[in-house]
């Protein structure tokens, strides 16, 4: 082994003819030479936590870095761009126990900048890497090994679904050797609980790329916890395994990374989704979708001309549909506020006025509701629904008046009663002036007169003899 | 316990106190070395320690240093002979004294001795000690903000608070050292999980925060601050404990995710702040900005990864109020930007919300920071940051920035940068779709517009307006062949910016002239005081939406004159722009 190593050192400076080009573009940017074959055929999957020892050398033989000097293997997540390109490519080809030498051109290392102070510009680097071991990728937030991913098929691209993204997944759940569920579904990430997807699995899917298939090992606390799941026959505190494939997803975009046309596109996309959910009476979901429509369109920077007209139209629709969802969910205050927003942009929106009318009616404000419905009728005299609602409002107003009369009839008497009670209580709570004064007076009497008092006895409006103080 | 031992113990205490009081240090020492007291030292350290430690005060050092030294020797001896558990508790109790560093520092050594006598059951005891130390260190008073600029910062080293802090840290480092060495990876220690190592790492991070974070840790080649030595030592410890110092970037990532998901996610609410994020930020400032231990950092990390992860740490630093923390943020930002070449950052990174936060906090420093140096330092950072992105990234940033910064000065600066980006586009063989045609027009109309049309306050927005005019003029001269497609939009631009501006200048000038006349009239009518000056002026001037405080006449005139000058400048630029447009190739 030692002899092999020294042999390797000599060839380091220029790669031998047996070196294989493993660079993705076949430009001889990464040459690999196996020094010691590894075990088996398995190589670490994308995302694995890999443990290696390595020695880095410049072409002139200067050693610039070595994990052995630090006394601990170097560890990193493979394929995440955390390390220089040649490493992500190179280590992915290695088996457990393998030792190989990589000759990396600067394009796959530190480029024309170099990495001061150790790596000069445009330097070719030589790494001797030994793969010690790897584990799945720990996806848990606390890094407690509760959610481990082993990738089976690598996904494409670099983007992963975020909160709110609609993901299409196939999942196979196993407890020990028993498959407890197997299904295909599409749902918005972050709402897994509604769809029987446990916390840990959700967290894992967040890290998937499109097309990726992985095995996810979950500790009980990220799965069915101490309760277990009787339906799926999962006992309490059971660790489980899922095999998950993310077939596709529609990312919930951060509006910052989009230009105006893309924002419109996203807004439309979510409008569609919202409408679908609305039709199937999934109002909370529809609400979420419409909120996104608003978030993509509410700021006007960067929108011009037609695009801006479209943006405004979408925004109004967003507000109006939000209002509708809120109405369905009996959340009248929100509904009214959303209508207000819509009407700010489009004061003569029939739908806006109508829905605000409904919201006001729901809030027990028939007067205001009536004004809204009447405004609708002014715009569209043939709107029967509005006309009916005006009648309804009138009825409500009357009812309310009746009720109010009853309430008010008693009210004055009640108020008067309450005032009396209050006064009485106030009186009770007042300190008894006479009594306390007595006490205070007691103090007065017990102390000797001051010189001042003696000289000016009249100041207390008593007779001048000092005795009178004592016997007051 | 035997009566005899109790008696002996009282006897020893009495002797020691007597000797120390009268300065007979030799007698005190011979008493402690006397074997007859060994048993009582072993059993009754609890009673003896306080009688010695009460001499550990500044007064003793000043008046009779030999007594102080003797006390230290005595305590070390007791630490050796005493029952370690008992002595530990007593030493800890004595050391817990926040007003006095003397006692605290003097007791660290005996504590260390005691801990080394507990090799197998050290965990909990060491944790207590480290807690006590951390508490002492973090409670040290910190110097007031001095707003020192440039060289003046060196004065900080003589601030009494800082001397005290440095002094305490030095003592603490000595305390840590043997424990660190014991589990150091460099000493071929096992690298597997180890409680003592983890504990030390956690507490070293605590020491990197308050008060170290707000001190000057810089080194300008020749002189370095005294506190920097402390920082260097702490990083050496860390490096010996964990090997790869970059590993904490993953921790920063976790924290960043937690933060961004906080609103929706209850998952994240973990309050056990074992490693404060500010400490992580200070750590990477020291490594990347100050190059401490940089040689030990693995040379395989991708600069882009370091940039991405550290940007969040920069935001953490910039959001602090203490200026030396802000400065660390600026220096870290500078360091991570220097690692990247222009155009090398892909736009996809912008998906992370940290970029918005970065620009926000950086522009806050640019505008509001109290220290002029820092404001000036921040400006080129913004430029450097923008140009690190690929063209699409630059475009996305430029189109989103106006909503974030909203300050005429920065807008003016950004317009200059926009000009540079357009030049890059014009110079490249491949015409990018971002700085040409409609996309470019969208940008220009965002930057070159009057926020309130004719009524825009021209003085408040002067920087932006002048930059905008320069940009349009530049484009019309440089792009004669309509490579950018700008000429297609000239008409719209005239309508939305140039015309209202001409009108605006006219109105503003008339307004200011009127004010000037008012002032002159006031001067004529006013009663002159004995120095021949007008003491008070009632004409009010409003600039940038704010009414100027009641200035004397001369100042008001000066303000008006400078405004009128600005209008002249704008007008001449405007007419130059119009000329260029009129003689342009595609103007029909």
Image (cartoon, coloured by chain):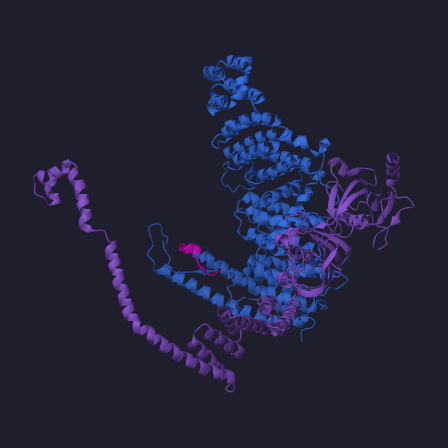
Chain colours: A purple, B blue
Residue B535 % position (x, y):
36, 53
Tally the numbered discs: 0
Q: Tell me if residue B550 is in the magenta stretch.
A: yes
Question: Who is closer to the viewer here, A464 or B302?
Answer: A464
Residue A296 % position (x, y):
61, 66
Asked if residue B50 is positioned above or below residue A439 in the image, the reply reads above
Quadrant where the N terminus of chain A sits is top right
Left or right side of A448 for B29:
right
Residue A111 seen in render: yes
Question: Who is closer to the viewer here, B317 or B70?
Answer: B70
Asked if residue A162 is positioned above or below residue B29 in the image, the reply reads below
Left or right side of A273 for A20:
right
Residue B219 seen in render: no
Question: Who is closer to the viewer here, A334 or B513?
Answer: A334
Which residues, given as a range, are shown in magenta? B544-555
Residue with the most extreme bottom position: A382
Left or right side of B411 for B549:
left
């Amino acid at each position: 082994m030692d002899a092999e190593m020294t042999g390797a050192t000599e060839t380091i400076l220029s790669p031998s003819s047996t070196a294989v080009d493993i660079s993705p573009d076949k430009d001889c940017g990464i040459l690999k030479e196996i020094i010691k074959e590894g075990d088996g055929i398995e190589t670490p999957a994308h995302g694995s936590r890999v443990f290696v020892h390595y020695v880095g050398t410049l072409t002139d033989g200067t050693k610039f870095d070595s994990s052995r000097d630090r006394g601990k293997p170097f560890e990193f997540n493979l394929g995440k761009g955390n390390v220089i390109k040649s490493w992500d490519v190179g280590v992915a080809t290695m088996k457990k126990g393998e030792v190989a030498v990589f000759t990396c051109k600067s394009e796959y290392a530190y480029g024309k900048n170099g990495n001061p102070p150790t790596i000069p510009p445009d330097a070719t680097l030589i790494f001797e890497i030994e793969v010690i071991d790897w584990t799945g990728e720990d996806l848990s937030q606390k890094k407690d090994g509760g959610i481990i991913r082993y990738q089976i098929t690598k996904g494409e691209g670099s983007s992963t679904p975020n909160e709110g993204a609609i993901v299409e997944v196939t999942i196979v759940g196993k407890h020990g050797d028993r498959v407890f569920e197997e299904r295909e579904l599409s749902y918005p990430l972050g709402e897994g609980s509604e769809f029987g997807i446990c916390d840990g699995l959700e967290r894992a899917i967040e890290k998937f790329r499109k097309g990726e298939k992985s095995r996810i090992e979950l500790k009980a606390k990220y799965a069915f916890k101490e309760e277990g799941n009787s339906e799926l026959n999962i006992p309490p505190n059971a660790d489980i395994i899922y095999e998950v494939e993310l077939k596709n997803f529609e990312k919930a975009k951060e509006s910052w990374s989009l230009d105006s046309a893309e924002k419109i596109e996203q807004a439309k996309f979510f409008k569609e989704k919202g409408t679908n959910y609305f039709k199937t009476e999934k109002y909370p979901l529809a609400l979420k979708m419409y909120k996104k429509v608003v978030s993509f369109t509410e700021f006007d920077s960067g929108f011009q001309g037609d695009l801006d007209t479209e943006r405004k139209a979408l925004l109004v629709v967003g507000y109006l549909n939000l209002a509708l969802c809120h109405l369905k969910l009996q959340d009248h205050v929100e509904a009214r506020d959303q209508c207000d927003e819509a009407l700010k942009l489009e004061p003569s929106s029939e739908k806006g006025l109508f829905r605000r009318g409904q919201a006001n009616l729901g809030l027990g404000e028939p007067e205001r509701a009536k004004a809204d419905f009447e405004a609708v009728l002014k715009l569209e005299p043939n709107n029967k629904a509005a006309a009916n609602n005006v009648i309804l409002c009138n009825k409500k107003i009357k009812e309310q008046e009746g009720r109010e009369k009853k309430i008010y009839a008693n009210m004055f008497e009640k108020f008067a009663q309450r005032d009396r009670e209050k006064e009485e209580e106030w009186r009770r709570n007042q300190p008894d002036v006479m009594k306390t004064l007595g006490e205070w007076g007691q103090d007065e009497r017990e102390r000797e007169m001051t010189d001042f008092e003696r000289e000016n006895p009249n100041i207390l409006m008593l007779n001048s003899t000092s005795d009178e103080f004592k016997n007051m | 316990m035997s009566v005899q031992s109790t008696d002996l113990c009282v006897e020893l205490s009495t002797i020691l106190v007597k000797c120390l009081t009268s300065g007979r240090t030799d007698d005190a020492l011979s008493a402690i070395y006397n074997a007859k007291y060994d048993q009582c030292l072993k059993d009754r350290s609890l009673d003896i320690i306080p009688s010695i430690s009460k001499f550990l005060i500044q007064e003793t050092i000043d008046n009779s240093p030999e007594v102080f030294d003797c006390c230290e020797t005595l305590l070390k001896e007791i630490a050796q002979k005493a029952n370690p558990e008992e002595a530990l508790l007593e030493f800890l109790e004595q050391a817990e004294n926040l007003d006095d560093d003397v006692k605290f520092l003097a007791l660290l050594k005996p504590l260390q001795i005691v801990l080394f006598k507990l090799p197998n059951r050290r965990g909990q005891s060491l944790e207590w000690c480290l807690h006590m130390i951390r508490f002492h260190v973090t409670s040290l008073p910190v110097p007031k903000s001095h707003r020192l600029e440039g060289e003046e910062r060196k004065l900080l080293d003589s601030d009494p608070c800082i001397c005290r802090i440095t002094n305490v840290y030095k003592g603490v480092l000595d305390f840590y050292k043997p424990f660190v060495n014991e589990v150091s990876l460099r000493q071929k220690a096992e690298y597997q999980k180890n409680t003592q190592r983890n504990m030390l790492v956690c507490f070293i991070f605590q020491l990197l925060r308050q008060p170290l974070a707000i001190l000057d840790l810089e080194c300008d080649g020749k002189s370095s601050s005294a506190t920097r030595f402390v920082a260097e030592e702490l990083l050496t410890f860390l490096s010996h404990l964990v090997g790869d110092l970059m590993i904490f970037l993953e921790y920063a990532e976790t924290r960043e995710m937690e933060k961004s998901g906080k609103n929706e996610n209850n998952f994240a609410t973990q309050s056990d702040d074992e490693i404060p994020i500010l400490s992580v930020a200070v750590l990477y400032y020291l490594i990347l900005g100050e190059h401490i231990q940089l040689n030990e950092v693995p040379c395989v990390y991708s600069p882009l990864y370091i940039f991405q992860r550290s940007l969040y740490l920069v935001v953490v630093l910039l959001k602090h109020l203490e200026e030396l923390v802000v400065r660390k943020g600026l220096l870290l930002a500078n360091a991570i930007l220097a690692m990247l070449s222009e155009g090398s950052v892909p736009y996809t990174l912008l998906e992370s919300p940290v970029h918005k936060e970065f620009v926000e906090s950086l522009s806050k420093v640019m505008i509001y920071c109290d220290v002029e140096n820092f404001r000036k330092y921040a400006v080129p950072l913004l430029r450097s940051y923008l140009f690190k992105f690929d063209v699409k990234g630059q475009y996305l940033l430029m189109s989103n920035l106006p909503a974030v910064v909203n300050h005429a000065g920065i807008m003016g600066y950004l317009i200059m940068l926009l000009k540079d980006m357009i030049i890059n586009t014009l110079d490249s063989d491949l015409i990018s779709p971002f700085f040409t045609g409609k996309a470019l027009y969208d940008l220009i109309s965002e930057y070159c517009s009057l926020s309130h049309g004719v009524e825009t306050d021209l003085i408040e927005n002067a920087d932006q307006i002048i930059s905008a005019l320069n940009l349009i003029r530049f484009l019309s001269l440089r792009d004669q062949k309509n490579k950018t497609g700008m000429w297609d939009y000239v008409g719209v631009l005239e309508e939305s910016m140039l015309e209202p501006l001409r009108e605006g200048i006219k109105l503003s000038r008339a307004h200011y002239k009127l004010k000037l006349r008012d002032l002159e009239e006031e001067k004529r009518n006013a009663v002159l005081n004995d120095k021949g000056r007008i003491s008070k002026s009632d004409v009010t001037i409003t600039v940038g939406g704010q009414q100027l405080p009641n200035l004397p006449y001369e100042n008001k005139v000066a303000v008006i004159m400078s405004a009128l000058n600005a209008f002249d400048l704008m007008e001449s630029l405007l007419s130059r722009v119009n000329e260029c447009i009129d003689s342009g190739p595609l103007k029909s």
